[in-house]
Amino acid sequence: MDLKEILSRCDHTLLRPDCTAQEIRELCDQAIRYGCATVCIPPTHVAGARRYVGDRMKICTVVGFPNGYATPVVKAFETDDAVKNGADEIDMVINLCMVRDQCWDKLQDEISRVRRACGGRLLKVIIECCLLTQEEKIRMCQIVSQSGAEYIKTSTGFSTGGATFEDVRLLREHCSPEVKVKAAGGITTLEDARQFLELGAERLGTSRIVKLAMEAEA
């Protein structure tokens, strides 16, 4: 798998809480130049990024990020606002409190509400694997598979750990075939990126791979 193919699977990401509009424009320029799948950016920058890129690049943003404990109504409102501002894809964080309390029906309802608010845009569900037991991960695979979401995603990158090979393998094994896997958090080398994709990830959330491409070009 060559670098161009890897880059085409990357959501070129900048979610630092103090990132500036200029940094977001530079991120967009890089993503367009290197053929990334999307830029993944904070909700506050979506409208500006959409004006800047037009239809040259897809824009992904986050909902309930990074902790996931906003109510379903709030997450649905965030999603609706992001879509109106020009987002093409939504990465939502599940309510981990509900996981701990085993409120599986409420989790299903939460994802469904956000799914409806997407208005046909692509939805990725972040389950924050580093905070879940093996049994909880498998249960979330089942719930996401039943929800209509297009992706299950390993991590926010803001918690105690990021993507692991073991988690990607597990998610791919226990999700239905139509649900894709996004690995995110701590992907810093081309070899790791290749291995995540070979294990079944369809998308990578990372900023480092484009930087490696830029370094190689230089």
Image: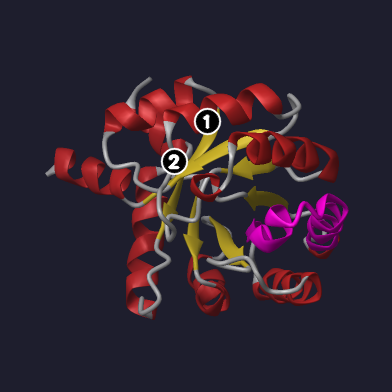
Measuring 81% from the left and 61% from the top, which residue is drawn there? 110
**Residue 176 point in image, percent of width and height:** 76, 27
Q: Secondary structure at mark 1?
A: helix
Q: CA distance from mark 1 to mark 2?
A: 7 Å
Would you say the magenta stretch is mainly helix, strand or loop?
helix
Check the picture and name the quadrant holding the C terminus. Answer: top left
State the residue position of label 2: 163
What amino acid is found at the position of numbered circle 2 in the picture? Ala
Tell me if 155 is positioned left or right of 207 in this view. Answer: right
Q: Residue at x 43, y 35 (%)?
A: 164
To which quarter of the image does residue 69 belong?
A: bottom right
Residue 149 screen position, x and y as percent: 76, 45
Residue kind at label 1, given as amino acid type: Val
Image quarter where the N terminus lies is: top left
Q: Position of residue 13 (x, y in %)?
A: 42, 57
Q: Secondary structure at mark 2?
A: loop
Compared to 43, does 211 lie above or below?
above
Image-based side of 138 in relation to 160, left or right: right
Q: Is residue 88 visible?
A: no
Q: Residue at x 81, y 75 (%)?
A: 73
Q: Which is more toward the observer, 48 or 149?
A: 149
- Whichever of callouts 1 and 2 sits on the residue coming sooner in the sequence is 2
- Specify start and end residues of the magenta stretch as a single range: 88-115
Is 22 inside the magenta-drawn segment?
no
CB within 8 Å, label 1 to label 2: yes
Which residue is located at x 58 percent, y 77 percent? 47
Residue that mark 1 sits on: 168
Task: Locate residue 87, reporting x and y percent.
Answer: 64, 65
Q: Callout 1 environment at 10 Å: few (<14), some (14 to 19), or many (20+)?
A: many
Residue lying at the far front of the rendered structure: 101
> How many numbered marks appear?
2
